[in-house]
Amino acid sequence: MSQAAERAEGAAPGHEWRNWSGNVTARPSAVARPTRVAELAELVAGATAAGRAVKAVGAGHSFTPIAATDGLQITLDGLTGVLRADRNTGLVTVAAGTRLRALNRTLALLGLALPNLGDIDSQSIAGALATGTHGTGGRYQGITADVRGLQLVLADGSVVDLQAGGDDPELFEAARLGLGALGVISAVTLQCVPAFDIVAHEYPAPLSDVLADLPGLVDAHDHAELFWFPWTDRALVKANRRLAPGADEGRPLPRWRGVLEDEILANGLFEAVCRVGAQRPALVPQLNAVAARALGERTYTAPSDRVFVSPRRVRFVESEYAVPRAAVAEILEGLDTFVRRTRAPILFPVEVRFLAADDVWLSTAYQQDVAYVAVHQFRGMPADHYLAELESLAAAHGGRPHWGKVHSLAADRLRELYPRFEDFRAVRDRVDPSRTFANEHLRRVLGD
């Protein structure tokens, strides 16, 4: 037995793994933390030969069991850092376990940035790709569309380097958003852009007014999103505009205000409010009304990643669907009707974001401009019926579920939603016929 396999065999007996929100747990029979690609390949080959399942994990920020296993769990925290960077082309190769926040810091030092980001930066880059992390921007795409190359460890332990237009274009296309079903990503090459600042404008507004001119909001701003507070007609709008590299416009947010609004109010006080709502659900409508009235307007300029990313310390479960932009108003109206009819104690605002179409096979924005509607519930509070209601409302519009967030769809329905679904399955059959990287969740969403 190899040294790598021996370390995995002896790791953490009885170890329980939990995802970030705590809604998914697993008991892997072994845990390994490789620090070299050769060691990772040896671990995967040994597990396949032994008939043991393998799942790689990063930050565990998915709300689904996509990374859960009772076999070998491979933690990617030992494979981190920027491996190569070309400031002229913007191509940056980064190890798979690198957290987005660390990548953003390094890119800033290089004078580069990712074109778009989600609002959470704790994920590993491999995890963000595997689940289709996106961000917002009516003319921009998600992170998977920025992938120009991948290094992938296959089930037999072979290490393949994939590029757009390379020797295996189908594997490259499938692996850009691979659900962890094709192999373990060890490194990724991303197309970055020159670092840029954003003028961020955040303001409260009646939801009805926002929805009345939603196309205008999306078209007039590079990165627009809104947060609607259930039980109210109030929304917080974020209407953000990119500045050309080197442009100097606007003022930074005073440090004291950032700490007060983003840390003390949006996290510390909000968690206290959620705990009150969990203990006394009847107070939730009043709590939401107070929170909505407390929203203030602010405008500031900051580097792109500091605007895209928001501190998220209050834990929750989430479901999100990509739908046609014209469906947003109807879906929000349906959620409002559901909340009021069932008196559901929903404290988290509903988040609406926008993205341009791309060509990534399993992307929720594949060949269509979309809006994303996301619902959240405070960890430990009843969530199932609320999440199911969003799923039902989205289904009427051909909604595609975010791969990293709670949904109940299985292969028979997902096949109808993704034109390249069978192409993806064919690639999977070719590179992982023994299903080394399968688990119960993937058996449901991809079928066997």
Image (tube, rainbow, N blue to C red):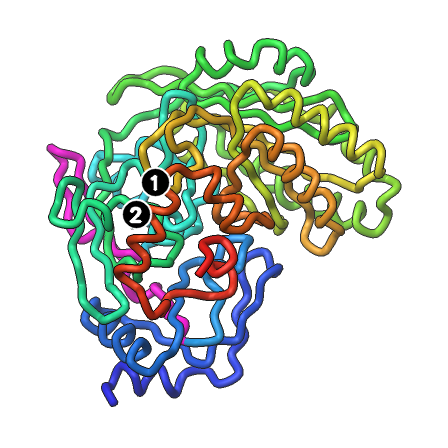
Q: At 44% from the left edge and 37% from the top edge, which residue is drawn? A: 364
Residues under numbered marks 1 and 2 in contact, where contact means CB atoms less than 8 Å apart:
yes
What residue is shown with label 2? 174
Location of residue 307 in the rendering, given as x and y in whole percent from the top left corner: 44, 31
Q: Does the image show residue 3?
A: yes
Q: Residue 52 versus residue 247: which sits nearer the camera? A: 52
Q: Residue 429 versus residue 295: which sits nearer the camera? A: 429
User: Is residue 282 found inside the magenta-colored segment of the image?
Assistant: no
Q: Is residue 120 left or right of residue 342?
A: left
The N terminus - image quarter: bottom left
Judge the density around disc 1: few (<14), some (14-19), many (≥20) Cα neighbours within 10 Å: many
Q: At 71% from the left edge and 49% from the top edge, which residue is drawn? A: 384
* Segment tinted magenta in the rendering: 72-96
Q: Amino acid at mark 2?
A: Ala
Q: Residue furthest bottom?
A: 1
Which of the labelled discs sits on residue 304, or is there none? none
User: Is residue 78 found inside the magenta-colored segment of the image?
Assistant: yes
Q: How many marks?
A: 2
Location of residue 381 in the rendering, given as x and y in whole percent from the top left corner: 74, 52
> Circle 2 — which element?
helix
The C terminus - image quarter: bottom left
In primary-sequence order, the first of circles 1 and 2 is 2
Location of residue 277 in the rendering, given as x and y in whole percent from the top left corner: 80, 45
Q: Residue 208 versus residue 176: which sits nearer the camera? A: 176
Q: Does the image show residue 303?
A: no
What residue is shown with label 1? 361
Q: At 36% from the left edge and 52% from the top edge, which residue is drawn? A: 425
